[in-house]
Amino acid sequence: MTTEHIVKSFDEELNRLDGIIAEMGGLAEAQLADAIEVLATRDAEKASRVVTNDKRIDTLESEVDAQAQRMLALRQPMADDLRVVIVALKTSAVIERIGDYAKNVAKRTVALAQMPPIGPSRTIARMGRLVQEMIKNVLDAYLARDLAKADDVRVRDEEVDALYTSVFRELLTYMMEDPRNITPCTHLLFAAKNIERIGDHATNIAENVHFLITGEVLEDDRPKGDATSFTVVQPDAEAAPDQGADA
């Protein structure tokens, strides 16, 4: 009877971890959707609210850390159960970063709202919607332990990379045509890069799911469609957006 009680209690703790991850993921997905919307509508007031909303995701990540540490110390899980705890820790950290990137897109919107509209905003919004779908699917895969769905998300990252390359080149063209475009285009480059990085993080969660289900660590051999490293521009017009999430 005592053993059954302990097992049931441990199962409840594992389910609690999944519940927190689900809440974090839902918030991050909503955060990204709002960030994409404000970028398209240039709504500085709503963008400021998106920045503030990131704090809830940070709080939930701390809850995952605390619960996982307690379980590791008190339960000493092994095999499959240990993987669940480890993957929850890794995934919560990734979702927290997704929230940060979405917040940074909103920060760029606050600045862009003060400038005339410019650049391929529709392409960036399309890229954002694709990434948003990837996040939803990978979180569903995580909660359902769906290997096929997780692997599909991993493959779709190439499409995001290709869209980012298109945006990158188009914005560089705007900057070379008129130096007055450099500031707004740089903000858009950072926004697009942040969205592209969210896509990368969605694939990281997909790889976590693969490890959770199979116990195997995937090699980083997924196809990449980001060709911006090979884009040649004039030195005085070159932007350097590949710096991760800006503060």
Image: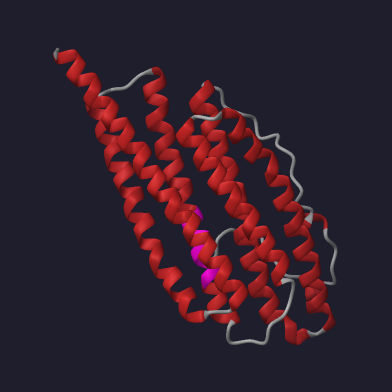
Please give the name of the residue rendered at 35% of the width and 44% of the height, measured from the top-left corner: 20
Q: What stretch is highlighted in magenta?
A: 98-106
Q: Where is residue 208 in the image (x, y as percent from the top left)?
A: 52, 34
**Residue 196 located left or right of residue 6:** right
Q: Which residue lies furthest to the left in this view?
A: 2
* Residue at screen point 67% across, 87% down: 116
The answer to whether residue 165 is left or right of residue 124 is right
Residue 43 visible from this viewpoint: yes
Residue 100 in magenta stretch: yes
Q: Where is residue 83 in the image (x, y as percent from the top left)?
A: 42, 26
Q: Is residue 122 left or right of residue 99?
A: right
Who's the residue at 55% across and 48% down the image? 135
Question: Which secondary structure type mostly characterizes the magenta part of the structure?
Answer: helix
Q: Is residue 196 magenta?
A: no
x%, y% of residue 239? 72, 70
Figure quadrant of residue 183: bottom right
Identified at 71% across, 69% down, the residue is: 122
Choose between 183 and 123: the one closer to the eye.
123
- Most foreground residue, 123 or 103: 123
In the rendered view, tell whether residue 217 sits above or below residue 105: above
Does the image show residue 236? no
Numbered circles on residues, count: 0
Asked whether 98 or 152 is in front, the reply is: 152
- Quarter of the image with the N terminus is top left
Where residue 27 appears, as percent x and y from the top left, is 43, 55
